[in-house]
């Protein structure tokens, strides 16, 4: 060769061409591969679709022995092994789905040094039998995929991952590469610490996905809004629609089918065979829309997903980023669309309050939700906010909703004071707590049965907020929640003041609010 590339690079490049059929490395793939081929440890943060697999597959092919890949995605192991086998790579897996004779065949191949790659479920690795097996064969590297599963407060925590710190103790000479697409600074540090990778070389790729257009809209009739998105922009395109509950997955999929969209449901409560069949249709046919809970998608590799829609608020920015990241892996324009409303906030808080675990865990969930809300309510570029969350910088993108139609803001201080003082009066004068619906009825001066029942038309604040529509008031509540100036509690989503509420009531703090860019909402009436 006429290049001055190191031997590691030329070997790696040869494998890239011959085995995988690609011309060149992407991003930092080459540096990462060199590090591992040379026997060093690596911690790789790369967004979904960035090309993490090659970072361990190529070193496994270049180095002597078998590369052991630890992955929680048991359901995908067969697919991964099949795909590698089709490329002529000698690969196998060991997990709980196999019959004993299948497992033995894979173990024999490993011991005979006839495997390039061996995929292992993390719980397998904990067994003494597996550890002895690895001792008897030749391991070229350990790849720890989905490494954020070791982060204890993350949304994908797997206790089995904690045991992976033993890899280095038991096999100190074998290089390790940990990979993840989820990485705030905190998760990043936790991975390094828990896996004993402090001395590893860190590779942090940009999380920017310039071809994805991020849009977040207020929710009024989510199914109709979704249909409008599909009809006007994504007719015949492959897409993923995320819903929070299995019931809404079923309902939304049925609705889309009724409207002539090729949609299929996917959630953990379905029969495994139906679920696999729906996934296969989505992967193999063109223009299928999968409606799913978040159970769907980890590790799914379909390059031409043109849109990802969320009908419910994701629990965290990490989750949102990972789910939207499944759009446009081929680099062509794609849409990430999210509809959220006040009810989402109430529901999520309720889930957090009722969640298992200690206070610290609940606080952490609350902080994740707050960050997600801040992204929804921002008047700045969505992409800039998203990157900033991952500790990276960016320029306003000119492609997201807030860049394209700058969100107007208005001085919501007086509205906030009216609303907060209603909550305060009910608590002080009547020892009562109510949800947003009743508070808004009082503000607007509506003599509903419930208002009359509780004598709320006698409150001094009754009717002081007739100038805003119900939808505008719901926006006010949502934004106060997002800014920590109001809180929800209990099973009924009752509203209560926070410590910071006093600053607004006392006139010491103004409250800028985002003007609702409500388009195409059939139920909206003109308001003064
Ligand atoms: P990740 O695991 O980071 O989500 P993958 O490893 O699945 O990403 O890669 C995403 C897609 O990009 C795959 O289809 C893969 O074959 C492709 N890819 C990865 N590296 C390259 C490259 N250097 N050149 C061309 N395509 C690549
Ligand atoms: Zn932007």
Image (spheres, helix red, strand yellow):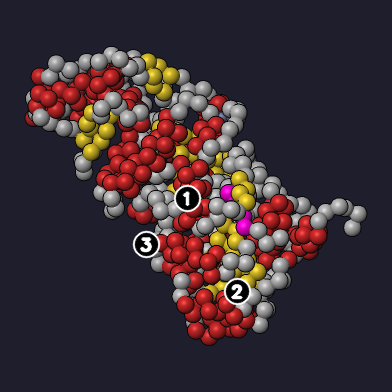
Compute the Cα span from label 2 to label 3: 29 Å
Q: Is residue 381 left or right of residue 31?
A: left
Give the total number of marks visible in the rendering.
3
Which residue in the structure is indicated by mark 2? Answer: 92
Q: In the figure, residue 1 lies in which quadrant?
A: bottom right
Q: Earlier in the sequence, mark 2 or mark 3?
A: 2
Which residue in the structure is indicated by mark 1? Answer: 190
Q: In the figure, residue 458 lies in which quadrant?
A: top left
Quadrant assignment for the C terminus: top left
Q: Nearer the viewer, mark 1 or mark 3?
A: 1
Query: What segment carries the magenta color?
Result: 41-46
Tag 3: Cα neighbours inside 10 Å, few (<14), some, or many (≥20)?
A: few
**Residue at 71% across / 67% down in the picture?**
63
In the rendered image, the vertical position of residue 58 relative to residue 303, given as above or below? below
Tag 2: Cα neighbours inside 10 Å, few (<14), some, or many (≥20)?
A: many
Q: Position of residue 245 (x, y in %)?
A: 35, 51
């Amino acid at each position: 060769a006429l290049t001055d590339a190191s031997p590691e690079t030329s070997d790696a490049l040869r494998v890239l061409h011959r085995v995988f059929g690609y011309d060149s490395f992407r991003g930092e793939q080459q540096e990462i591969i060199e590090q591992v081929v040379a026997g060093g440890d690596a911690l790789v943060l790369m967004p979904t679709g960035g090309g993490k697999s090659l970072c361990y597959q190529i070193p496994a092919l270049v180095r002597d022995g078998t590369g052991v890949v630890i992955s929680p995605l048991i359901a995908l192991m067969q697919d991964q092994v099949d795909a590698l086998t089709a490329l002529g790579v000698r690969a196998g897996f060991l997990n709980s789905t196999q019959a004993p004779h299948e497992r033995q065949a894979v173990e024999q191949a490993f011991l005979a040094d006839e495997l390039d790659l061996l995929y292992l479920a993390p719980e397998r690795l904990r067994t003494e039998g597996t550890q002895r097996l690895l001792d008897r064969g030749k391991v070229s590297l350990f790849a720890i995929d989905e490494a954020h599963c070791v982060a204890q407060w993350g949304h994908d925590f797997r206790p089995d991952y904690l045991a992976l710190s033993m890899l280095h103790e038991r096999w100190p000479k074998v290089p390790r590469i940990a990979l993840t697409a989820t990485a705030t600074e905190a998760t990043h540090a936790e991975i390094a610490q828990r896996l004993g990778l402090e001395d590893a070389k860190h590779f942090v790729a940009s999380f920017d996905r310039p071809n994805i257009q991020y849009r977040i809209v207020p929710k009024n009739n989510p199914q109709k809004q979704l249909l409008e998105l599909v009809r006007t922009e994504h007719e015949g395109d492959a897409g993923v629609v995320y819903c929070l509950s299995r019931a809404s997955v079923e309902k939304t999929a049925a609705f889309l089918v009724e409207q002539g969209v090729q949609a299929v449901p996917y959630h953990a409560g379905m029969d495994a065979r139906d679920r696999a069949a729906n996934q296969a249709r989505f992967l193999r046919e063109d223009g299928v829309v999968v409606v799913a809970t978040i159970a769907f998608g980890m590790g799914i590799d379909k390059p031409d997903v043109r849109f990802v829609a969320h009908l419910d608020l994701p629990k965290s920015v990490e989750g949102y980023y990972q789910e939207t990241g499944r759009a446009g892996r081929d680099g062509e324009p794609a849409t990430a669309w999210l509809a959220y409303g006040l009810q989402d906030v109430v529901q999520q808080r309720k889930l957090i309050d009722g969640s298992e675990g200690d206070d610290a865990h609940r606080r952490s969930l609350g902080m994740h939700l707050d960050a997600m809300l801040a992204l929804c309510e921002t008047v700045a570029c969505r992409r800039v906010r998203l990157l900033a969350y991952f500790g990276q910088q960016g320029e306003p993108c000119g492609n997201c909703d807030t860049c394209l139609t700058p969100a107007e803001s208005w001085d919501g201080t007086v509205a906030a004071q009216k609303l907060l003082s209603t909550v305060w009066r009910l608590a002080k004068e009547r020892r009562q707590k109510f949800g947003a619906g009743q508070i808004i009825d009082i503000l607007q001066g509506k003599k509903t049965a419930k208002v009359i029942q509780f004598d709320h038309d006698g409150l001094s604040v009754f009717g002081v907020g007739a100038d805003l529509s119900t939808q505008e008031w719901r926006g006010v509540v949502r934004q106060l929640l997002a800014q920590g100036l109001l809180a929800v509690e209990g099973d009924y989503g009752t509203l209560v003041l926070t410590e910071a509420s006093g600053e607004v009531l006392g006139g010491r703090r103004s409250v800028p609010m985002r003007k609702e860019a409500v388009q195409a909402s059939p139920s909206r009436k003109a308001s003064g």
